[in-house]
């Protein structure tokens, strides 16, 4: 009897103490992953299938990994759907001008720096232009994908006709054979506006996903059946449904939820020093084939255009029609959560060279040079207010 009472007593302690044994779940605004609101049950099931493929499927030699590769899964480069770490940073090389990558077939456009036993990882050829690319966060991409070409072009000003010093231009990309334009995409001389990637070299999330499987993991698909080692056609190593599920997952990841939203002074400073001319705060989607993305107002802080960022950020590499000194304006939402996936530190800019938000701002040149100068002229208190605002997005 005593043993039974002792057993009941310990069970009561364990069950009653779950609150201190099991830590509380993070608040929604501290997480980047999770679906957009309003998905149907069928869409939610597809989101889950894509989530599993993206975050849980780890490739091995038996399932097609490599034989040369960078990562073994999608999620290993985007922990919690956040930004990558220097360990997962990619190396792109070989393209010296906008005419095309002259090193395809000789290792380019991406360096596979790991290899299966019996194979050798690729080495960067000497004297070849290259760029280090830190994987971006994934959240909210479906909202950006839903925008129309006309909305993006409305902010382009190649010749700076309004005289504000900002001359953003789209990156026009030759579509892959499997590309099917959406209702809001229009060809210009056979090319389409790129939206994704550091230089906006991917037209849509299907291209981004297919390329990542092939170039990052060495996995072929019906969309990209070329082996990255031999450059010969081979059978698909991941099925089409999995690719489409991952694309749906990326399209329906929620946008980051703002935190500490009382930083109105910082928001005013952001506008005053001109950051919002490239990092456009607010957009509204047109109608979408996914109703949960239709006619939604969201706040990514980007214009999806290429901008001259000055000689300090000119790495000699380009993609599509982008010049070597041009970079697509990155989204700022979720910026304050970046250390969660980057080992507790910031690794910002295209290659992770900046270790704080202030350092990232001070690396801006070219069209952003005036905003950088105005930032440097702020008082220490004003700089802190601006940074607190950016961390809240």
Image (tube, helix red, strand yellow):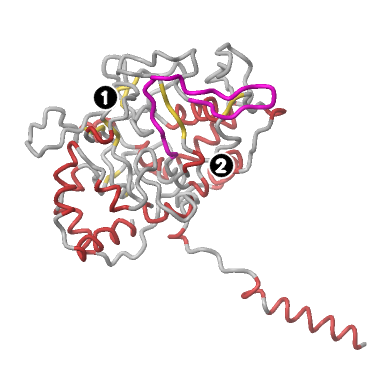
Where residue 362 appears, as percent x and y from the top left, is 24, 47
Q: Is residue 140 above or below residue 21?
A: above
Q: Earlier in the sequence, mark 2 or mark 1?
A: 2
| Residue 302 placement (x, y as % from top left) | 28, 42
Q: Nearer the viewer, residue 137 or 122?
A: 122
- Indicate whether residue 120 is drawn in magenta: yes
Looking at the image, how many numbered discs can be counted on the residues?
2
Q: Which mark is residue 323?
A: 1
Residue 91 higher or lower than 320, as above or below: below
Q: Is residue 379 above or below residue 159?
A: below
Secondary structure at badge 1 equals: loop
Q: Which residue is at the far front?
A: 126
How many angstroms separate mark 2 from mark 1 (CA)?
30 Å
User: Residue 23, percent across and down?
Assistant: 59, 69
Q: Which residue corresponds to mark 2?
A: 76
The part of the chain drawn in magenta is 111-135
Q: Residue at x 53, y 26 (%)?
A: 112
Say which quarter of the image contains residue 328: top left
Looking at the image, residue 31 sits to the left or right of residue 282; the answer is: right
């Amino acid at each position: 009897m005593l043993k039974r009472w002792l057993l009941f007593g310990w069970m009561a302690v364990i069950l009653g103490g779950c609150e201190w044994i099991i830590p509380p779940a993070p608040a929604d605004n501290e997480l980047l992953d999770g679906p957009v609101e309003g998905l149907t049950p069928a869409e939610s099931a597809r989101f889950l299938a894509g989530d599993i493929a993206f975050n849980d499927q780890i490739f091995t030699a038996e399932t097609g990994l490599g034989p040369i590769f960078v990562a073994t899964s999608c999620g290993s480069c985007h922990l919690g759907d956040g930004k990558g770490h220097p360990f997962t940073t990619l190396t792109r090389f070989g393209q010296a001008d906008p005419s095309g990558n002259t090193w395809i077939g000789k290792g380019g456009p991406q360096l596979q720096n790991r290899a299966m036993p019996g194979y050798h990882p690729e080495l960067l050829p000497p004297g070849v232009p290259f760029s280090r690319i830190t994987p971006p966060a994934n959240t909210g991409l479906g909202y950006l994908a839903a925008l129309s070409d006309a909305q993006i072009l409305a902010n382009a000003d190649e010749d700076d006709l309004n005289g504000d010093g900002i001359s953003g231009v789209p990156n026009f990309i030759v579509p892959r054979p499997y590309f099917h334009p959406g209702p809001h995409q229009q060809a210009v001389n056979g090319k389409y506006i790129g939206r994704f990637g550091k230089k906006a070299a991917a037209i849509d999330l299907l291209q981004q996903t297919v390329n990542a499987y092939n170039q990052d993991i060495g996995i072929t698909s019906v969309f990209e059946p070329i082996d990255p080692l031999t450059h010969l056609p081979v059978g698909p190593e991941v099925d089409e449904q999995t690719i489409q599920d991952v694309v749906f997952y990326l399209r329906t990841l929620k946008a980051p939820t703002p935190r500490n939203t009382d930083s109105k002074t910082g928001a005013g400073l952001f506008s005053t020093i001109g950051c919002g001319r490239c990092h456009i705060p607010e957009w509204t989607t047109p109608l979408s084939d996914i109703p949960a993305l239709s006619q939604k107002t969201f706040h990514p802080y980007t214009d999806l255009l290429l901008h001259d960022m000055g000689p300090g950020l000119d790495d000699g590499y380009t993609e599509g029609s982008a010049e070597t000194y041009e970079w697509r304006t990155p989204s700022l939402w979720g910026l304050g959560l970046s250390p969660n996936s980057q080992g507790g530190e910031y690794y910002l800019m295209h290659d992770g060279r900046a270790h704080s938000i202030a350092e990232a701002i001070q690396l801006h040149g070219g069209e952003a040079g005036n905003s950088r100068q105005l930032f440097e002229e702020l008082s220490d208190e004003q700089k802190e207010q601006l940074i607190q605002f950016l961390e809240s997005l």
